[in-house]
Image: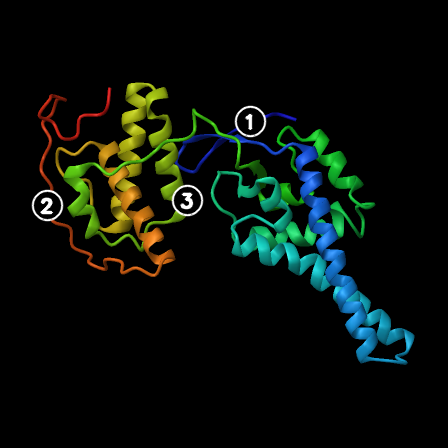
Amino acid sequence: MREESDLVSGEAVVLDLRIAKLASRCAAMMIDVALQFALLLGIFVVAALATPGADTSLILTIVLSAFVLVMVGYPLLFETLSRGRTLGKMALGLRVVRADGGPIRFRQALTRALCGVLVDFWVLGFAGGVAVIVSLLSPDGKRVGDYLAGTVVIRERVPDAGASVTLQMPPPLAQWASQLDLSGLPDELALAARQYLGRMGELRAEAGDALGYSLAAQVGHHIGAPIPPGVPTWAYLSAVLVERRSRDHARAFGQPVPQQAYADPVPQAPAEPSPDNPFAPPS
């Protein structure tokens, strides 16, 4: 199985994702299974105490219902609410993402959960045998549920210098960005813009410029604020993403978030980089 996967987003941005190895996925699965069986045991004990002397059919109904509820509901709930992480994956630093690198939704989590019970692990999976065989045969370590849901499991805690980028707010755009309405910016598009900023130095000039303008045009369409004249695309995208990140942090800590949809004009940059150019890229 490969260490990395070259996945292409909907905006044609190559994502060098660190694919989770089978060993780490199995370890995460063991943690999740232990927690699931603990939940099942607790449900059975409570049911036994609440229904003393119950007949066999009632007991089988309770057992089957609890099994489906826990085995499907546990991964579905955690992967939906945490964008691709169960408790086991959190412990091992893993995350499920879509094939384009974006966060999974309820549909992908449900597909994975149902397929995990029916095919990969339990009903027809011979206690995980199917999942292991399919993962070993897959170049990206996918199990059947990943193929049907269009997902892949990655490692989050491995630094990737080529894929990481520290975004900073271009000072001339700070006030302008603070008044943008960013509620319509999709997560997938923001991810593609971030990946582009991390790799624009690796792209050919023509391809990088074309991709940057395409992303900026899409971002401008969603937020209702096109790129101002003279502002480089990388500065525009950086300002939008940094402002979006700042607002997410503000919401997390209960701080006020700007709601204006009007953006003040920004200073225009000269056509060529110079010492007086506030948008000159770092050398």
Left or right, residue 155 beside residue 113: left
What residue sits right under mark 3 in the picture?
Answer: 188
Say which quarter of the image contains residue 18: top right
Question: Which amino acid does the dot numbered 1 rest on?
Answer: Glu
The residue sitting at 28% across, 21% down in the picture is 206
The answer, for residue 208, to whether it is visible in the render is: yes
Residue at point 73% right, 62% down?
Answer: 39
**Considering only order in the chain, which callout, 1 or 3, is on the residue closer to the N terminus?**
1
Q: Residues within 10 Å of mark 3 (few under 14, many from 20)?
A: some
- Residue 265, which numbered label? 2
Which-is-in-front pick, marks 3 and 2?
2
Identity of the residue drawn at 65% across and 58% down: 74
Amino acid beneath label 3: Glu
Q: Is residue 208 left or right of residue 176?
A: right
Does 160 appear above or below 58? above
Image side of residue 209 versus residue 71, left or right: left
Q: Reading the chain from its start, which is encountered first: label 3 or label 2?
A: 3
Q: Where is residue 26 drawn, in percent x and y?
A: 71, 39
